[in-house]
Image (cartoon, rainbow, N blue to C red):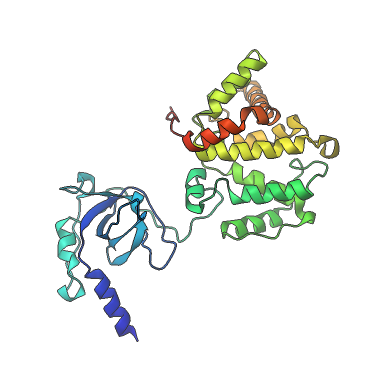
Amino acid sequence: MWKPQLERAVSSLNVPAIAAAHVIKSYVAQAPDEVSLEVGDVVCITDMPPKELSPWWRGKRGFQVGSFPSECVELISGTVPESLVNSLRKPVPKKQGKFLPFLRSLVKARPQRARQPEPEKEGVFGCDLGEHLLRSGRDVPQVLQSCSEFIEQHGMVRGIYRLSGVTSKIQRLRHEFDSEQLPELSVRDIHSVSSLSKMYFRELPNPLLTDQLYAKFLDAAGAATEEERMVRMKGAIQQLPAPHYRTLEYLMRHLASLAGNSSVTNMDAHNLAIVWAPNLLRSQQSQSACTSGGAACLEVQTQTAVVEFLISHADSLFSSKTSSAMGEEAGERLPPLA
C-alpha cells in the first residue's frame, strides 16, 4: 500500500521549479496539503498564480511539498542573499528526485542563528496580538468577545472584574481557548470568566497600549485641562497598530457599559480602571530596582488615570468616523523602543 504513496510523493518532488524564494515570514501549516516555513529557508516555487487571483503559492521546502501564503516569501533574483550562503545540501540518489541539482545550484542554506524548534500549533495566550488576529482572521480576540458578551449578559454582579475566580477553572478555560475551542461558560464561574479576560491581556508580549506609546499615554493623562487631555489621548490612540486599536475600542466600550451599571456592581470607571490598568500598561522603569516606592506609586496612579479616561470617554475617543478610518490605517507609525 505504501508504493502508490511513495510514487505520488516522488512525482510531487519531480515537478520542475519555476522560481526560488527565501522565507521572510514564518508560517505554520494548517492543513495536510500545506507546508510550514521558517524565516531564512529557501523554497523552490512550482506554482505562483498572480496575487489578485490567489494569495497561495505552491513549492518545495526540502522534501516537503505544499501550499503557503505568498506574502511569506520573497523571490530571489539572481543570487541567494549572503546571510543564507553557509552550507550546501548533501546529494542524494538521483532516483529520489530531479529537483535536488537545481536546489543545490541555489545553495540551500540556513541562517547563521540557531534554529528554533517549530511549534506544532500556535496558541492564544501569550501570543502577539497582531499575529494572533492575522492567523485567526478575526477583528478582535475570540477570548475577549466571548468573555465580554457573557459578562454583559450574566455578570452584572457586585465586584465584577475585582473579585478573582477559581484558579483551576481559569486554567481549564484557558486551555480550551488555547486549543481553539469555544468553552461552555457558566454563570457560577462568572469571576473565573472575568479573571480569564484580564489574564489574556496581562500575558500579551506587547501590552494593548504598547511599550512604544507608554510615555505618550501617561503624558496625555497629565495634561492640564480636559480639552488638552482629549487631544493628546486621541493622538496616542491613533498611533496604535490597527489590531491594538480595534481591540482597545471593543474593550473600552465593554467596560463603559459595565460602568453604567455601577449602582449594581459597585464598579464605576475608576474602580474598573484600578483593576484593568496593570493589564493594559506596562512600565519598564517601574520594574527597575532603582525606582523608589513613591515614584512607582505615582506611576500606578497615572496608569489608572489613563484607563479611567479611556473608559469614561469611550464614545468620544472612538467615534464611528474615527474608528472606521483607524481600522484601515492604524499601526503604521509606531516608533521603535529606545
Q: Nearer the viewer, residue 292 or 185?
A: 185
Which residue occupies the extreme top position in the image?
Answer: 224
Where 113 sits versus 288, above or below?
below
The answer to whether any part of residue 253 appears in the image is: yes
Which residue occupies the extreme bottom position in the image?
Answer: 1
Q: Residue at x 54, y 24 (%)?
A: 235
Q: Quadrant of residue 251?
A: top right
Rendering coords of residue 131 (x, y %): 47, 47
Q: Nearer the viewer, residue 196 or 8?
A: 8
Where 315 sits versus 40, above or below?
above
Q: Residue at x 74, y 47 (%)?
A: 151
Q: Quadrant of the C terminus?
A: top left
Left or right of 262, for residue 311: left
Rendering coords of residue 122 (x, y %): 49, 56
Q: Nearer the viewer, residue 9 or 190?
A: 9
The answer to whether any part of residue 109 appears in the image is: no
Q: Quadrant of the N terminus?
A: bottom left
Rendering coords of residue 148 (x, y %): 69, 46
Which residue occupies the extreme right position in the image?
Answer: 263
Left or right of 296, for residue 65: left
Q: Residue at x 63, y 47 (%)?
A: 144
Q: Quadrant of residue 290?
A: top right
Left or right of 10, for residue 268: right
Q: Quadrant of residue 336?
A: top left
Rendering coords of residue 59 (x, y %): 28, 61
Q: Residue at x 80, y 55 (%)?
A: 188
Q: Nearer the viewer, residue 169 or 243?
A: 243
Q: How many marks?
A: 0
